Amino acid sequence: MYLQTLMLALTARGPGTCAEVSVAGYPDVVRCELNIPPELTIICGFAVGYSDPDFPANKLHIGRDPSRNTSCSSTTDPGENTDRIDYRLSRSARSITPIAG
């Protein structure tokens, strides 16, 4: 919650923010580069800065499919014995296919 609140507060004041969760997968590298002691847990990195509106990637706008095309829900009787069902998103993200487990 702290990180979310900090990101929202900064964004409201102008700078953009980005949580860099992928750095948690490389704790040894991050510890070495930033001199972080081993007793501290690395959860994520955090970037703060101002966007460049002229940079081509910042002009990219990607449409979104309606949620009914990309998600599903299931209801079951709590007393019913059900097997686990995994779902696979199609490459086009327009259909979801149950996979027998």
Image (cartoon, rainbow, N blue to C red):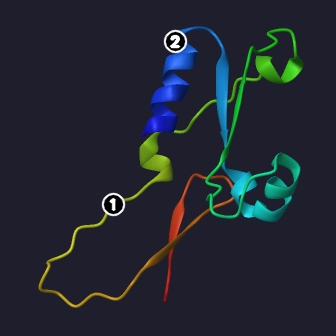
Q: Is residue 56 above or below residue 101?
A: above
Amino acid residing under circle 1: Ser
Query: Between marks 1 and 2, how big is the CA–CA gap?
Result: 34 Å
Number of numbered discs overlaid on the protein picture: 2
Residue at 88 percent across and 50 percent down: it is 33
Judging by the rendered image, the residue that carries numbered circle 2 is 12
Closer to us: 86 or 23: 23
Residue at disc 1, secondary structure: loop
Amino acid residing under circle 2: Ala
Quarter of the rendering occupied by the N terminus: top left
Q: Is residue 79 above or below residue 16?
A: below
Closer to us: 61 or 36: 36
Residue at 42 percent across and 80 percent down: it is 85
- Residue 70 in the image, given as x and y percentages of width and height: 50, 51
Check disc 2: other Cα within 10 Å, few if <14, some if 14-19, many if 20+: few
Seen in the image, is 51 located left or right of residue 94?
right
Residue 11: name its quadrant: top right
Q: Can you tell which of label 1 and label 2 is closer to the viewer?
A: 2
- Residue 13 in the image, given as x and y percentages of width and height: 56, 8
Q: Are the residues at dot 1 and dot 2 in contact (C-beta closer than 8 Å)? A: no
- Residue 73 in the image, given as x and y percentages of width and height: 33, 60
Check disc 1: other Cα within 10 Å, few if <14, some if 14-19, many if 20+: few
Closer to us: 53 or 21: 21
Residue 78: name its quadrant: bottom left
Q: Is residue 78 above or below residue 101?
A: above
- Which label's residue is closer to the chain start, 1 or 2? 2
Residue at disc 2, secondary structure: helix
Residue at 44 percent across and 54 percent down: it is 71
Q: Which mark is residue 91?
A: none
- Residue 61 in the image, given as x and y percentages of width and height: 70, 23
Judging by the rendered image, the residue that carries numbered circle 1 is 73
